[in-house]
Amino acid sequence: MTPKTTANQSLFTAEQALNNHISARTILIAVDDSDESARALQYVGALFRDIRDVNVTLFHVLNPMPRELMEHGGSENPEMEDHLGEQLRKDQEDWLRAESAIEYPILVIAMERLGQTGFPLDHVTLKLGHERDIADSIMDEARAGGYGTVVVSRHGPAGTKRLFSSGIIDRLLRDLSGVAVWVLG
């Protein structure tokens, strides 16, 4: 598989990368349960399996939180308002916990696929993101984690998966400055 590698317009110099905690040896791979994602894992694993100072984070974005958990109806009574807010936070935490339990196996399978290439699993971290917007979730993680490279897969025919649509890839390429974005497909 030949990668389609794209670097954004304003890459950091080596000094800027160090100052911004960006490392070319840290790779964020956005994964889902698609065949394209599996092929991206195989490519990256085979490419870096013998380079021991490369660290990979497998990142999966959860489904969106249901609308009814986004806000409560409110109350003019301050005590009731506090109670409703507290209940909403508890319901959100419960939903996130349940959704994470459902989606976490996608990360485990991705890690197994990466390991099958010979990539050392002690250099792999698993992370879940929360979708308010998929592209924003990936960019937030890339910036917070100081990743030098973000890998996404381009999905096949319409209807196969929504995670890495061209709109999301376009936003990553346009808005994620200072980070190499690899689009594998």
Image (tube, grey):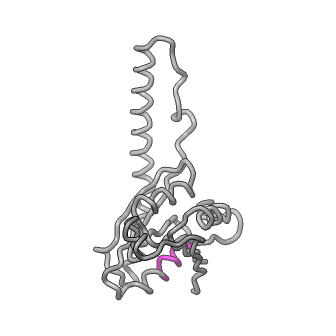
Q: Residue furthest left?
A: 122
Residue 38 lies in the magenta-colored region: yes
| Residue at the image position 55 percent from the left and 47 percent from the top | 132
| Residue at the extreme top | 77
Quarter-wise, where is residue 185 in the image? bottom right
Helix, strand or loop: magenta stretch: helix
Residue in the picture at 47% in, 60% down? 60
65 horizontally vs 173: left or right: left
Quadrant containing the N terminus is: bottom right
Residue at 48% x, 50% y: name it. Answer: 130
- The answer to whether residue 148 is above or below residue 47 is above
Question: What is the x, y in percent for residue 70?
Answer: 53, 35
In the rendered image, residue 121, in percent from the top left (x then y), is placed at 31, 75
In this picture, which residue range is highlighted in magenta?
Answer: 35-43
Q: Give how far across and how far down residue 29 sits, in percent.
A: 47, 69
Q: Is residue 137 above or below residue 48?
A: above
Give the quarter of the image for residue 97. top left
